[in-house]
Structures are given as C-alpha cells and as structure tokens.
Amino acid sequence: MRRITVTILFLTLFSACTLLQTHLYSTDLYAKNTVLHANADSTPESGEDSSKSKDSSKDKKPAGGDSAAADMPSLNIAAPSAVLMEAETGTILYQKNEHDARPPASVTKIMTLNLIFDAIDKKQIALADEVTVSETAAGMGGSQVYLEAGEIQTVETLIKCISVASANDACVAMAEHICGSEEEFVAQMNQKAAELGMNDTHFANSCGLEADGHVTSAYDIALMSRELITKHPQIHDYCTIWMENIIHNTRRGAVEFGLANTNKLLKQYPYATGLKTGYTSAAKFCISATAEKDGLKLIAAIMAAPDKDKRTADAQTLLNYGFSACRVYKDKNPPKLPLMPIRQGSTEHAALAYETQMSYVSTSGEDLGQVTKKIKLPASAPAPVKKGDVAGQVTYYLGEKELGHVNILYAQDVEHAAFADYFTGLVKKLFFLKDTEAAGSKQ
C-alpha cells in the first residue's frame, strides 16, 4: 500500500512539474518575443513567430548570389569560351559559352592538386613524405620533369613540379602514391567534380593528355579553381614560383634540374597569383588565371584561345574589367545574437552562431554603405535542438532589393528535459517568482 501511495505521489508531482514548466514557458516571464533586427545598427523590432527549418541547404540563397551575371559586359574576348568569377562568393561577372565541353589540357592539374591538398589536410600524406616513381609515371609523355623509375622525391617537390613545370610524370607519381593507381585517383577526381557541381566535366587521366571523353568547361574550371584557392590557399606558394631547381636522385647520382613556370602572366600582370596553363593541339591554349587586388580575388578561365598572346590578352581583359567594375560588401560586424529559449529542454537556452560571413558583389556602382539587415528568429524553440540546425536567418537589403541571407545556426545540442531537469527548473522558477515579488514589495 505504501509503494502505491509513493508511486501516485511521484506521478502527481511529475505531472505538476511538467504542466507548470510548460505554463511558465508560455508566459512572457519565460519566453521572449521574436527577435527581429533591422538596419545596419541592428535595432530590435517586434515580429511574428516562425518554425524551425530542418534543412539549411534546400532554401538557402547564397550570401552574395549571382546577380552580377544578369547583364554581361561587352568585352573583346578572342577565345570561344571564357568565364570571370569573383572567388569569395562565386559570382559570375562574365561568361561566354561557359558550358561548352572542351579538352582542358594541363588545366586538368587543378583538380589533381585539389586532391593532393585534400589528402594533406586529411593527414593521409605529408609534404615531407617520400614518393617512389614507378615505371608508369616515368614513362609519361608530354610536359614532364624527366623523373626516372625508382627515383625518390618528396611530396612537396612533386607539387612544385606539377604547379610550376606542369609535369605529367609528377602527376601520375602522386596519383599512384595517394590511391595506388592512376585509375582510382581519376575516379576520385570525377567524384570531386560531381561534388563541386562540375556538370560539364569528365576526367580520363590526372594530367590532361588528350584522351577520349576527357573534357571540361570554362565554368567548371572556375569552380575547381575556386575550390583550390579558397580551401587550399597555400597553392599560391607553389604556383607563383617563377624558377627553381630540383635535384634528381637516381642510381646514377644527383642531377640538378631547372623548373620554369609556364604561366607568363606572373611577369606580365602585376596582380597575378596563379594558377595553371594548358596546351595541346586539340585543346589549344587554355588558362585559369587568378589575381588579387585590394582584397578582391578573381578567376579568369579561358579555353581554346588560338595562341599564347590571345590567351594572355583575354585573361588580362577579364581581370582588368573585374577589378574596375567590382565592389564587395562584407558584413564584418554582424549583429550580436541572443540566446534562444528552449521549451522543455535539458537547458533553458541554446547559443546561436552565424553559418558564414555575408559577402555581396556589385558591378553597378551601388552605394553599399546603405545596406540594411534584418534578423528573424522565433520567440523560442522546442527541444530537442541539434548543433548545426537552422534557427533563423539574417537577410540583407539594399533599398527594396534583397542581396542574400546567412543562416543562423544552433551552436549546441539541447536534449529533451528529464524529470530532474523539470524539477530543477521548477524550483528555480518558484524562487525567481518569490524573489521578484519580494523586490517589488520593497519598492
């Protein structure tokens, strides 16, 4: 009988705690109004409740968008296919037959370098690791540094050979070192291309030698170039080397060999930072030219230019246009985010964080000092919430024009409250009410 009585009392207390906790959350004492900030100084305003988004990618408008691509400038570009991209936001500033699939020659090596640096980031390989050159790698034709079978070079030296001298033999040596075979490495290149949205691309080898079905587009070259320079900016330490010597360590002894950069823009264009040239008789003259001026980073992708001079002129024309026309807005001081009240959670609040920094590219001379921003968040959220889930958004405007938005994410997990959490919360609230009433009676 005593056990039954204790059980009934326990269940009664649990129900009372749950009901009271829920009631307290529903009152202004426990839940804040929706947070809605407007204008650059983030002045609070009232707003309506909104439900929690489950997927940050389905309705996400990129911060900055691609509005600049709506009106293409009239530029004298000799190459049949070209793209100019702002690197930070991915905004397309100029395009000409950007999705035409063509052989890319050695510009292929941009994807090879992406995979090499990915492997370094994942600790699969290190710059100081030694690579033994196979007969297959040593037998590659085309542009090469004449590696010999059995020769040992470091990963860093082979990166220099690829970046500076466009060495096909170094590409195959690294592909085999990372994946065991070039075939498996190429499969990973195509997988990476698919992940980046390179829908015009199929790779048949790691170096860009002519092969059936080995194609990409100017747009896709810009995509993989952006991936390389933003995820692995150390590439600029290698692709900007003008000349350097390496040592061939072979059975015949040590022999010095000179590397000379194939990207002449490094000497002809003051803002050039890379990236990769390419040529075959089928591909003609190709380049992914990267440059930076006053913090603005651009990528000019040129395919099938008729000669070296027109390839260089086209790249300079695109880069000069970009630097003269582009202005970038960056929200370096976004509004401070509040704590989010959590209903029926193991903790009362969850911290919030911005998913990324807002960037917007303008080519129309807009006054970017007049950008306003509005934060929209619900008054509270029900448990559970998961770190990385979307809680709300900050949206950016220039007058009536929406420039883009950045998601606001939960910065921590909050589980459903257990009985102990309800009981502790109830006690805190009761004491809070008591203290508030006492303070009020003294005034």
Image (spheres, helix red, strand yellow):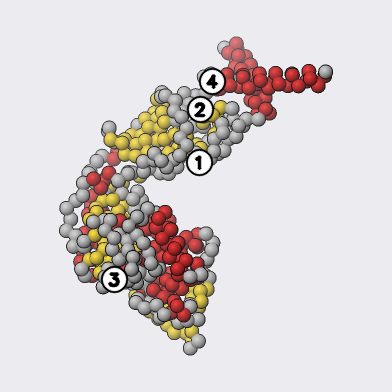
For disc 4, the neighbor class at 10 Å (few under 14, some 14 to 19, many from 20) is some
> Which mark is first along the chain, 4 or 3?
4
- Residue 157, above or below 217: below
Q: How far apart, in angstroms, are the residues tagged by discs 4 and 2? A: 9 Å
Q: How far apart, in angstroms, are the residues tagged by discs 3 and 4? A: 68 Å
> Which mark is first along the chain, 4 or 1?
4
Q: How far apart, in angstroms, are the residues tagged by discs 1 and 4? A: 26 Å
Q: Is residue 203 left or right of residue 339?
A: left
> Which mark is first along the chain, 2 or 4?
4
What is the three-letter code of the residue carrying label 2? Ser
Towards the viewer: 88 or 191: 191
Can you tell which mark lies on residue 279?
3
Can you tell which mark lies on residue 388?
1
Q: Return the residue found at the far right.
A: 1
Q: Is residue 323 left or right of residue 333?
A: left
- Residue 284, above or below 301: below
Task: Give coordinates of residue 134: x percent, y percent.
Answer: 48, 78
For disc 3, the neighbor class at 10 Å (few under 14, some 14 to 19, many from 20) is many
Q: Residue at x 36, y 55 (%)?
A: 198
Label 3's element? strand
What is the three-letter code of the residue carrying label 1? Gly
